[in-house]
Image (cartoon, rainbow, N blue to C red):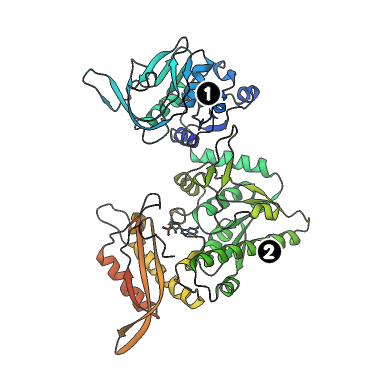
Amino acid sequence: KILILDFGSQVTQLIARRVREAAVYCEIHPNDVSEDFIRAFNPRGIILSGSHASTYEDHQLRAPQVVFELGVPVLGICYGMQTMAVQLGGTVEWSDHREFGYAEVRAHGHTRLFDGIEDFSTAEGHGMLKVWMSHGDKVTTLPPGFKLMASTPSCPIAGMADEVRRCYAVQFHPEVTHTLQGQAMLTRFVREICACQGDWIMGDYIAEAVARIREQVGDEEVILGLSGGVDSSVAAALIHRAIGDQLTCVFVDHGLLRLNEGRMVMEMFAGRLHAKVVHVEAAEQFMGHLKGVTDPEQKRKIIGREFVEVFKAEAAKLKAADAGAKGAKWLAQGTIYPDVVESGGTKTKKATIKSHHNVGGLPEQLGLKLLEPLRELFKDEVRALGVALGLPHDMVYRHPFPGPGLGVRILGEVKPEFAALLQRADHIFIEELRKTVDEATGKTWYDLTSQAFTVFLPVKSVGVMGDGRTYDYVVALRAVQTSDFMTADWAELPYSLLKRVSSRIINEVRGINRVTYDVSSKPPATIEWE
Ligand code: XMP
């Protein structure tokens, strides 16, 4: 296994991710762990991360000296390179001025780390690498025993290697995808230089995560708010695998979920996984509070607030019902790595959680400890984990669904009858997207879009059906393609698909007589209508 020592870089998790992609197990620990810890960890190799290192004090961060005494390969990245240089007798010029960006790095001579890895070669036959570089601080003298491994015009020592000691360091970031050969370099380091097997699979991750959860939780009880979304579902399945009936899932149905959501969640978790799930039917309560409210932000606030109320009430009930009067000690959340925001600026980095999933502040209010087993995973890893845990593909590869649900997809006042119409119309849209395969790619239109849904417009228009005149509501279909949800393009769905959806909605959902398609990009529109 590989030990990653974290100096607080924003992208340390990406190093772990690349190592896992090379099928090698790794763990991230703070840069100041004890020497005993490192010896006991018994790593096959050590990677020193970058750092946000923006103040002079940060430049004092060092790796425990034992890192260089164990005789295992060490790879320093960015700040990791600088501290390696300082600790092994080289010199570094610190600077508060930093530049980030694309760079072309020349590889010098043959080193095990770069041998045969290059993006192109120059007319003179130098191997060149296209990388993502951050420089400012730079190594100015190589430590004794090291040779130059890489350089750029503005950073003459952009890489160094001591092949006898098997110490390597690069100024650029191999863990980011902008460094095209980054994965190849990290795979080379862990698989060949550290001689790790490359037999680590998601199944092992499950075993390790299960062991960690058991150790953390002991015999205490855990509650988790299950939403039907990917993250909370995977967290629930993983924690259930670890502690079985010590986990209680609370599924709050606020009446603004997708059609059959409640049934699906119960079938999956209570039925197939045999997990304890409390299904709270709270539609009336939510609808009651939303009555007469038309402002979108107000609606969001009410839904968020009521969610917390319902969840707290359920937690209290569970506590009261527990004969041993132990009650839950833990609140589990499906927080994933992108949700973890680092505050930075201090020696030991602190992570704060986005107040999302409608439960911000809940753990404190309930006096519960937080259990977040997905904290170090990226979305696609969470999905792979979900599949490995036996969750159905369709559940794990679902489009995102906002916490306030249909509450922000029914424009203006939310009424139960509007929600009922919208659920059925949206169900038809999604069903057709899942059924329709694009011939060029072989993928369904559901998989070709990032998010697709139906919006209820509380306006009536005239139509004709059979011999009669109708005066009914309008819905808008929305389908977007995006990689980060910050910008998005409307999807060019085939006309034949739109035609089928429109005709089915108008024929099958009495009360809707007109279907429109939203052709607005974000920006200036947003993905949701409210
Ligand atoms: P917009 O509409 O801002 O949406 O372009 C970007 C992404 O965020 C989702 N979204 C929400 N998710 N609570 C959530 O949990 C919310 O209040 C909320 N509003 C928007 C939206 O579905 C899209 O994926």
Which residue, given by chain and number where applicable, does mark 2 sit on? 313
Please report contact status of discs 1 and 2: CB closer than 8 Å, yes or no. Answer: no
Q: Residue furthest front?
A: 96
Secondary structure under the numbered disc 2 in the rendered image: helix
> In the rendered view, does 193 fall on the left or right side of 432?
right
Q: Would residue 1 be seen by someone viewing this image from the given angle? A: no
Residue 524 x/y as whole percent: 35, 58
Which residue, given by chain and number where applicable, does mark 1 sit on? 44
Residue 106 x/y as whole percent: 32, 21
Is 355 or 272 nearer to us in this picture? 355
Q: CA distance from mark 1 to mark 2?
A: 49 Å
Q: Would residue 182 be seen by someone viewing this image from the given angle? A: yes
The image shows residue 62, relative to residue 280, as above or below, that is above
Q: Residue furthest right?
A: 324
Residue 37 x/y as whole percent: 64, 26
> In the rendered view, does 12 fall on the left or right side of 308?
left
Which is more N-terminal, label 2 or label 1?
Answer: 1
Q: Residues within 10 Å of mark 1 (few under 14, many from 20)?
A: some
Residue 501 x/y as whole percent: 32, 70
User: Which amino acid does the dot numbered 2 rest on?
Assistant: Ala
User: Which amino acid does the dot numbered 1 rest on?
Assistant: Arg
Q: Residues within 10 Å of mark 2 (few under 14, many from 20)?
A: few
The image shows residue 144, relative to residue 23, as above or below, that is above
Q: Quadrant of the C terminus?
A: bottom left
Please give the name of the residue rendered at 59% of the width and 72% of the height, measured from the top-left corner.
289
Q: Quadrant location of residue 171?
A: top left
Q: Residue furthest top?
A: 144
Secondary structure under the numbered disc 1 in the rendered image: loop
Please give the name of the residue rendered at 29% of the width and 53% of the height, measured from the top-left corner.
442
The image shows residue 302, relative to residue 101, as above or below, that is below
User: Is label 1's Cβ within 8 Å of ligand 1?
Assistant: no
Is 270 or 9 nearer to us in this picture? 9
